[in-house]
Amino acid sequence: MSAHEIVLRARSIRRRWGGVVAVNDVSIELARGEVHALIGTNGAGKSTLVGVLSGEIEASSGTVELHGVDVTRWTQPRRARAGLGRSYQRSTIFPQFSVLENCRLAAQARHQRPWQWWSAASRCDVSGAAARQAASRAGLDGVLDREAGFLSHGEKRQLEIAMCLATDPQVLLLDEPLAGMGAEETGRMLELLAGLRSGHAILLVEHDMDAVFRIADRITVLVDGAVIASDGPAAVRANHEVQTAYLGEAA
Amino acid sequence: MNPRHAAWAAAILALALFPLFGGKFGVDLVTKMMVFAIFALSLELLVGQVGLVCFGQAAFFGIAAYAVVRLTPQDAPASIWWLAPAAVGASALYALFMGSLSIRTRGVYFIMVTLAFSQMAYYVAHDTPLGGGTDGIYLNLVPTFTLGGVVLVDLAKAKPFYYFVLATLATVFVALAVLLRSRFGRALAGIRVNEQRMRAAGFSTYPYKLAAFVISGMVAGVAGFLFAVKDGFVNPELMSWHVSGTALMMIILGGMGNLQGAVLGAFAFSLLQELFKSQAIFGDFARHWHLGVGASIILCVALLPRGLAGLPALLRRVARNPE
């Protein structure tokens, strides 16, 4: 497999909510080894698009392909098992489980015998090993046995990523992984994401422009559900339309 | 031995020794309490572990009980070897039917749909010849429990039956505890906390919830089977919403989220019921025993947010921190 192979390809995605068109004719490609940032103001349709790609929201029209296979009609769990992982804007960890158990549970979905009911889950070698590896990659080695509810905000966000990694995905759809983080935590998370670049195709939805321009290989800008630009960071920064519609507004 | 294990050992010992000095009334009462403990465990699996608030649990209880009476031949006792699986299987089938349709709904709709399904079963028993109408039906002959011609347990006698129910309760409890620790059980717990996250991780949650629903129906069926054998009589009231409500009150009283809470709740509820029904203590007021039971449950919920099962932890906290 080549380094920049297209893993996920969405064509002409449209999603209506009643009379409102939240996502309007959006096409996007995610390549292995690339961080593709998706930016736009609140209500631009970013989260809806992530929902459509992950299978959580049905597209009104358009197609989604994973490794060249049309997965438009696949349910979210099926897409997840095929390698499409996502994280959520608000932490969705299981607060009463330990860090390791959170990851193990996520890893378990891909286990060949998920129904086995007689032996203890904690003794499952397959999901246990995947969980340890995922937690380690997300930098949570030191807190494996801590109850997830007691983690710091930054660690909770890392755990969110770790749970995603535990499912062994090829595509990571990350919905604002930096939300609510301080400078130090942001730095740590960016380092983590940069490390994930090889081997994964990453879609990064983010409001923190400094972070986006530091890490993204490609940036797609959404305004009112439609793509107004999709290019490398330098080209997007120089794009006049983007400046007036979004960056200028923020400055 | 830590206090937790000591409490367990004491409880099991007390239950095992109880028939030696409990008297006829006592043995009968505790047998009933243990049957209801199994019933409460079935609901705890759904409500406390998967987060599905089922308000139709009485249907599974009643269907198994009716199956015992209906399937027993007129002239000879049935063997438990086929009667019990048949009764529990009937409950499982209805649970599969009810679950496959109701699990698609959520929250208050789920409560209402499960209630509607159990009321359907209630009216079948109430208004058709199959159920024998409001008067109910008697069980002619208690099933036999033999192996190779040797009687293993004489289910018609109170004390052997007591031990049979105790063994069943222990088996159900241990099986559920093992199940909840397994990968399947952890997935159920994940679904309770955040079903969306589980789907994003790749779990098709519907079959998991349906499996839990059917297992719960089977456990309720086990309780219904024992109830019919014990009482030798069934009537439609077994399937009424009061019975579903009682099971809910038991697990709330005992504390949701753990199995021992369901058992504690079933015992406590039955004891409260006996207490407030006692004419010796309450005289004429005993007729209004619902009031007393209801008030104690409200009090319990207000004072013990984690139910009776949370009492030790609460006491420890208070002892450490008297403020």
Image: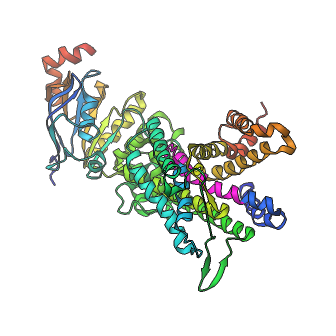
Q: Give the range drawn in magenta.
A: B31-56
Question: On the picture, is A56 further left or further right than B46?
Answer: left
The image's colour scheme reads rainbow
Residue B229 in view in this figure: yes
**Considering depth in this image, is A172 or B86 the residue closer to the camera?**
B86
The residue drawn where x is 61% and y is 80% is B146
Instruction: Find residue B33 and report its image quarter.
Output: bottom right
The number of numbered badges drawn on the structure is: 0
Q: Going by the picture, which residue comes out furthest to the right?
A: B280
Instruction: Find residue A19 and report its image quarter.
Output: top left
Q: Main secondary structure of the magenta part?
A: helix
Residue B122 position, x and y percent, is 51, 48
Question: On the picture, is B145 further left or further right than A235?
Answer: right
Residue A132 in view in this figure: no
In the rendered image, which quarter contains the N terminus of chain B? bottom right
In the rendered image, which quarter contains the C terminus of chain B? top right
Residue B312 position, x and y percent, is 73, 46
In this rendering, the answer to whether A119 lies above or below B126 is below
* Residue B43 highlighted magenta (yes or no): yes
Residue A67 position, x and y percent, is 17, 50
The residue drawn where x is 67% and y is 60% is B231
**Considering depth in this image, is B33 or B118 the residue closer to the camera?**
B118
Question: On the picture, is A201 further left or further right than B114?
Answer: left
The residue drawn where x is 71% and y is 51% is B267
* Residue B297 highlighted magenta (yes or no): no
Instruction: Find residue B318 and report its image quarter.
Output: top right
**Considering depth in this image, is A102 or B84 the residue closer to the camera?**
B84
**Considering depth in this image, is A9 or B76 the residue closer to the camera?**
B76
Question: On the picture, is A164 further left or further right than B89?
Answer: left
